[in-house]
Image (cartoon, rainbow, N blue to C red):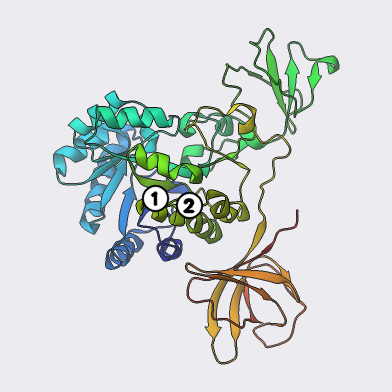
Amino acid sequence: MPAWNLEKMKYAIAYWADAVYAWVPMFSLRARENQFSWEDLATAVEYCHERWVKIYFTANIYAHNVKIKPFIEAFKKMYALNPDAYIMSDPGLIWIIRKEFPDAELHLSVQANNTNWAQAKFWYDIWIKRIILSREISLREIKEIHENCPEMELEFFVHWAICMAYSWRCLLSNYMAHRDPNQWTCAHSCRWEYKVYKNEVSNEDLYDSTWRPTNYIPLEWEFYLEERERKWELLPIDEDEFWTYIMNSRDMCLIDYIEELKDAWIISFKVEWRSKTINYLAGVWRGYRKAITAVENWEKYDAVELSKELFAISNRGYIPGFVVWDLWDKSIYFEKNAELKEEEFVWIVRWYDNNDKLAEIEVKNRFDIWDSLRVISPDSQFEMIVKSIKDPKWESKEAAHGGSFRVFVNMDENPGEWALLRKKAIQ
């Protein structure tokens, strides 16, 4: 699971993550949004190792010349903190680290786009221990990679927001909003509202934004996109027999395929975050942890039941990504560009009084008297009705408005540590 900062890392571990990955200052592709300082990373390593959880440092920058020397200096700091591995992508930097730090365990980032067994053999020959495989490969290809390079550990993303570009190499956000996806500032331009024009622009050639053919027919015309806020700024588009991958892609969810991935020799299942909340982290792992544990014990699991946790959190509808190579029109969510979720994250239970049966709640999203809330924790969940709300001055309120402040509510059961609150989302 991703460790966005110390608090979220602790929640990831509380919700049964076996390993976390943390971004390092300056030299990861998420550097702009990284909330870890060097002091925090030292604390994080100690916290993880005390709990027998592995922690990997993400140092997957593709460096220009000017950054090579400072990267090596920064790596000395990383090395001194003793994480379990370093996730890297730049071949040149990997080559340097291999020479100067020969005992450092290196994992190849998904950014390196490993899509075949020949690449796996190449990386194994220079002592890469694990590859986080490209998302654009199928189960069959994963098996072939293992069969041809069985010594290599293989890791695979099982849950993330699919990007329309090849492994996040997106120019659309850069071009339209001057925001770099690989610096975690993606504007999600592929999910904005567009109209489709055919050949020369005229009202007669205008297609509704939800138009799509039922069967693939090779293009005989030129097609253009017009973004809602950029009138008459037409963007040429193309497609092949596998569709046009721009527009509002659904999210990838592989909870149905845990057993198949294990059989393909995936030994580590990874979750992508992109600025999500603790609620997202908890919901994803409440589903996947049970599936993985079942597969580890050679037992079956109910993917439909477990996926209820995944539909409760923010999503754009789910597809199995590229592992089955059968996306077609199901890969795009045409109806609207807003996120989907069945439950609203109220926020966190910060403290509980066993004597008075009161919970101190940090509030981000509003709830009212008589609302039904779901309390979830790593090991349990229960429903409750809000019968009283008191502010810090102990004045009674009819509602707790969002805005990151704290209130006290009745709660008959002790929710335990790491508890979160949700309510039914308004559709």
Q: Is residue 13 visible?
A: yes
Of the residues under marks 2 and 1, which one precedes in the sequence?
1
Badge 1 crowding class, 10 Å Cα cut-off, few under 14, some 14 to 19, many 20 or more, is some
Q: From the viewer's perspective, is residue 374 above or below residue 129?
A: below
Front residue (pair 356, 79):
356
Report the Cα–Cα distance between label 2 and label 1: 8 Å
Give residue 29's quadrant in the image.
top left
Residue found 51% across the figure and 27% down from its top: 325
Give residue 208's quadrant in the image.
top right
Furthest toward the top, the residue is 220
- The residue where tag 1 is placed is 295
Secondary element at image label 2? loop
Q: From the top left corner, tell me how far across and down residue 240 is, in percent.
A: 57, 16
Taking the image as shown, residue 122 lies to the left or right of residue 226, namely left
Q: From the top left corner, tell me how far across and down residue 153 is, in percent.
A: 27, 40
Q: Amino acid at mark 2?
A: Tyr
- The residue where tag 2 is placed is 301
Taking the image as shown, residue 31 lies to the left or right of residue 312, namely left
Asked if disc 2 and disc 1 are in contact, CB closer than 8 Å, the reply is yes
Q: From the viewer's perspective, is residue 247 above or below residue 303?
A: above
Residue found 53% across the figure and 71% down from its top: 419
Taking the image as shown, residue 245 lies to the left or right of residue 61, namely right
Residue found 63% across the figure and 43% down from its top: 316
Q: Is residue 23 visible?
A: no
Furthest toward the bottom, the residue is 355
Taking the image as shown, residue 404 lies to the left or right of residue 142, namely right
Furthest toward the right, the residue is 204
Q: From the top left corner, tell me how far across and down residue 32 is, in percent.
A: 46, 48
Give residue 193's quadrant in the image.
top right
Secondary element at image label 1? helix
Q: Amino acid at mark 1?
A: Val
